[in-house]
Image (tube, coloured by chain):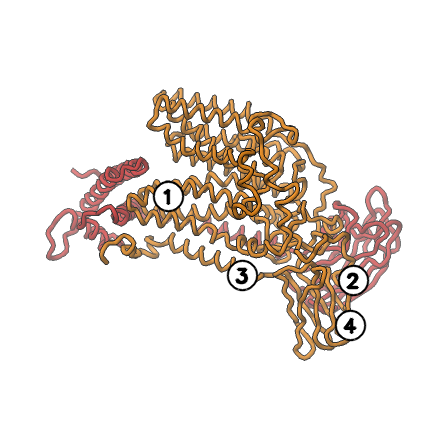
Chain colours: A orange, B red
Amino acid sequence: MAVAIGLWMPLARLSWFLGHEQASYVLRTVEWGLEMRAGELYPRWCPDFYGGYGSPFFVFHSPLVYALAGTLHATLLDPFWSLKIVLLLGSLVAGVGTYALVFGETRDRDSALRGAVAYLAAPYRLGDLYDRGDLGEFVCIALLPVVIALYRAVAREALPRRAQRLAVAAAAAHAVLIVTHPVLGLWGTLVIGLIVLPSVVRLARRRSLHRVLLLVGAMACAPGLAGLYVVPALAYRGITHTALMVTGPYNPQDHWLSFDALFSRSTPAFPRNFMQIGPLLTVALGAALLGLAFNPRRAWRAFPWLGLCAALVFLVLPQASAFWAPHGVPLAPFIQFPWRLLGPAALMGSVVLAIGAAAAWERASDASRSGIAILGAATLLFLVAWPYASAKEMPIDKIPLDAASIRQGMISTAAADEYLPLETRVPPSEPPRDLVTQADGAAVEYTNSWGSHHLLTLRAQREGATVGLALLGFPGWTVKTVTGPSGAEAKLEMDDHGLLRLRLPTLGQYQLRLWFGMSRAAALGLSLSLLTLLTLVLALVHGSRPWPWRLQVKVLTGSPP
Amino acid sequence: MIPPFPQTILRARRALDSGRALYRENLVPECHTHLASALSILMAAWSAQAVEATSPAGEPDTEANRAMAALERAGYPGVERLRAVLETSPTSTDLDMTWGEIERLYRFSIRSLDPPARRRQIHLMAAIAAGLALVLLVLVLWRLWGRPVATASAVYSPHHPAANAIDGLLATEWLLPDETTGWLQITYSSPRVVHAVRLMNAHNIHFQDRGAENVRVTAYCEHRAVASAEGRFAEIVAGPSPLDLNVNADCVTHLRVEVLSYFKTGGGLAEVQIR
């Protein structure tokens, strides 16, 4: 934990830091906080992006970092410190999670320390924060060891009640991982699946069908629990410009790394090459081979992890370029940069290093084992982590932190405007003067906006009058006619530019409430999440005092009823 | 001789831990042996606990029956299940049921060992933790949705946001961009009564070059304007510069202050106070 805090400290000393993402996360946190204060528990609309035309950014971007930092910002802190606290938590979780994972594999505290420090010191993990500024991915790869540790614990736990609780915790942690980063949530799930699969096979061969059910059920529950985010993100992907995410400069086939780049301190693209995973893997391989020489019975366990690590690193090399081709593996090109897999690869490398070292020094005395572990950890920190644990100060004077300033800046925080609805071919170029852009056969008597909530009083001077709004159309916009002439209700439609338009069917005054609420896909996702949550709660209480009766699963085991 | 109950629990725990360690190494039969040993230890302990307990009528006075009687008296919820486990020899398919019962009995035994004072202490601690969590939740909810929110048509810079006009500090100001009129809106979490509004003018510290001149305050109840008043600041002054407006209304959900004209380079307000 001290190492995790120490490696986060450079961030604490700065107002904000200059990463590739610049102030994007700060602006999104501000938007999340403003929407929360406007009454949205899970905001999906950024009302001030594109000068006030808005953006469905949070429909697609994983919400965890914004939810934590946004809540802190809406209640207590400025957005910078809110994000810093989330990142500190991420750093701590990475350390504690890796410690738990390695301890579960080796039952050796010294090796657990060695593994945790190796992962905390991994250049990619630090580069994700200080160079790239991709805070979502940083937190996502911090959660990965926790989720793997929990699934592994489920498979290895003899006591059924305890295994049941661990399975529920694993499913919940896995769901949190999925809602932390869209790309690594998906790839992390694949890595977790590959790690869980051998355990499932082993348990099935032993006919422990309860345990198989528990593991597979937990794995299945995780995406279900994350349905609140996953379902709308998948459902509405096709009605935005997300195709731009995998073309041009974001084509994953152009972002391979040469083998040399895995070992060099700097590359032409990155003066501080945070993709330098080579030294860690070399040390890990050395430790595994050393372990194999001294203690093969224990050291062989490092090799499945090593295989997975090698497979992940291979996908980063030019030889794997075909894997990332468009129309090949579904959703694979959305990784954008295959070197993102170096995060999970660094974790696998740290586990290999720890298991190998545990095997090699198993017969050494306690004192010498601890001494070697501390020396190894210190070496990793000073030689590997030190050059990467620093950041440049970013001046915060010009960062807009309120709705009006963000609107004036015509900001979207999406480099390729990928979340712009398809009907809007070109992003708006300047902020609208008012909420109502044009009125055809109607007079505007009153408008009032608060985030994505709007009140309008309109008077229709003819039947079928229309009122154009400076809001991008997207599933989720809802209009409610508070009062209308003889029960007539205003209708919401989209114009040729993808902007919202109100149609007033009959003459008279309309008092309207317009807001970005829950779309059909969001409602479906929420239902799925609630259903999964209910399943997990039932799994948690099953066998406990509130529900002591045992479920009959003898049909599965083939025993007579 | 049977050792005292707490020591027996320790022995049972050791057997359970050994079983779990063997399971981790994939040694299932060896694990079962240790877990079964834990069960025997616990049953012996319960049997010894119940000195005065006797076996149910018609059943032989065995250790298992005495333990069952003692467990029944202690309120153990799964006596029948435990009896079934003891009577059957588990196959590989229902080891889970047997082990689950052993785990349940172990947990129950630990709970039974707790003296009432300690149990009360645990309940008290849980109640305090729940109380603190509730207070924290209320605080968060109030911070989220209990405070008024200020929004504006535009701001001069990120240092002069609309929120500066309701932060209670005269030193911070909401300023409009150069040569622009605009509005500031305060939205309340619930409808409230307003008798009067005091506006404190901006002056833009160091430069003394900005401030509102003519202003209009309108109180709204949802879609309806319920009260309105206009006023004028005489000039920009370095110190506090109040302007009291008579805006009297019930059910005010939001208040809009429009800057209709300004002094020198632009408009702004230091504070909006409601009475």
Q: Mark 2 points at which residue?
A: B217
Q: How many labels does the image show?
A: 4
Q: Which element carries disc 2, helix, strand or loop?
A: strand
Which badge, 4 or 1, is on the more N-terminal residue? 1
Report in which chain the residue with disc 3 lies: A
Q: Are marks 4 and 1 in contact (CB under 8 Å)?
A: no
Classify 10 Å Cα crowding around label 1: few (below 14), some (14-19), many (20 and above).
many
Circle 4: is it few (<14), some (14-19), or many (20+) Cα within 10 Å? some
- Mark 2 on the same chain as mark 4: no
Residue positioned 74% across, 40% down in the render: A397
- Say if residue B220 shows up in the picture: yes
| First-in-chain label (4 vs 3) | 4
What x and y, as percent, mark residue A422? Answer: 66, 56
Q: Which residue is drawn at 44% across and 55% down?
A: A532
Q: Position of residue A378 (x, y in %)?
A: 51, 23
Q: Which of marks 4 and 1 is in front?
A: 4
The residue type indicated by label 3 comes to Ala
Report the disc number at residue A441: 4
Q: Mark 3–mark 2 contact, CB under 8 Å?
A: no
Image: B137 above or below A333: below
What amino acid type should be assigned to the residue bearing mark 4? Gly
Res. A154 mark = 1
